[in-house]
Image (cartoon, rainbow, N blue to C red):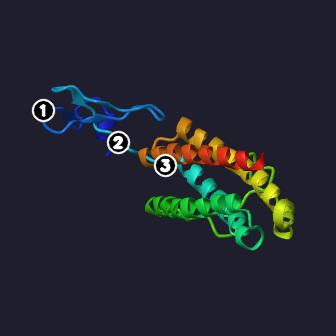
Amino acid sequence: MLAGCTSSGAQEKPGLVAGTGAPVIVPGAPGDAGRTAAPGERVARQESHASAADVLFTERMIPHHRQALEMADLAPSRTDNPGVRRICERIAVGQTPEIGVMSRWLRALGREVPGEHTGHTGADGYGMASLEEMNRLRASRGAAFDELLLRLMIRHHEGAVKMAGEELAGGTDQTMLKFAQDMASGQRIEIDRMRGLLK
C-alpha cells in the first residue's frame, strides 16, 4: 500500500492518458472548477485517503444535523407560516439523507457513528442551540416561534458552513470534500431564504 510513497525500487501506479474518445476531467482544488485534459496528457490518478480532519468533520456534523432536524420537526405543530414550514421541510428532506451518507462513510472506516444524544453545547462555536434555547423554542408558538426558529437556524447553518470550510481547508478524502462543498453551498442558499423571512 505504501509503494506509491517510496522513490526507490517501487513502481508508481500508472496515470490515465487522455485520448480522442471520452473526455478526461481533471478535478480542480476544492471550490474550483475542473478542466478537460488535452489529448495525450497524462493525468495522475486521484487517490482518496481519509484524514483526522475528515473524521472530525463527520463526527461533528452528524449531531449538528440531528439538532437541525429536531428544530425543523417542531414547525408543523407550532406555526402556520408557509415560508417557515417550507424551510423546515427542505431541511428535513436535505439533511436526513446527508446523515445517512456520513454514517455509512464512518462505518466503512470502522468508526462508530455518534449516538442519538451526542451533541454540543450552545457555546461550541458552530451555532448549536443550547438546552435553554431549545426549551424556549419548544414552548413558543406562532410568530414568536417563527422568529426564534429562524434566528437559531440561521446561526446553526452559519456554524455548518464554518465546519464545512474547515473540512475544505484540512480534509483529504475526495468524497467528504465534495460533500462539504455541496452542503455549504446549499446551506448558504437556505440562510438567504431565512433572512428574507425575517424581514
Amino acid tagged 1 = Thr
Height in image: 115 above or below 28? below
Please identify the residue farthest to the bottom as the structure is shown: 77
Amino acid tagged 3 = Phe
Q: Nearer the viewer, residue 32 or 139?
A: 139
Q: Residues within 10 Å of mark 2 (few under 14, many from 20)?
A: few
**Residue at the spot 48% in from the left edge and 60% down from the top edge:** 101
Q: Is residue 9 left or right of residue 132?
A: left
- Give SS at disc 2: loop
User: Where residue 112 appears, x then y in whole percent?
Assistant: 55, 65
> Which residue position holds label 2?
47
Q: Earlier in the sequence, mark 1 or mark 2?
A: 1
Q: Is residue 54 left or right of residue 17?
A: right
Q: Earlier in the sequence, mark 1 or mark 3?
A: 1
**Residue at the spot 86% in from the left edge and 69% down from the top edge:** 139
The quadrant where residue 35 appears: top left
Mark 1 to mark 2: distance in Å? Answer: 24 Å
> Which residue position holds label 3?
179
Question: Mark 1 and 3 residues: CB-CB less than 8 Å, in contact?
Answer: no
Label 1 vs label 3, nearer the camera: 1
Disc number for residue 20: 1
Q: Nearer the viewer, residue 6 or 63?
A: 63
- Give SS at disc 3: helix
Q: Residues within 10 Å of mark 3 (few under 14, many from 20)?
A: some
Question: Mark 2 and 3 residues: CB-CB less than 8 Å, in contact?
Answer: no
The quadrant where residue 58 appears: bottom right
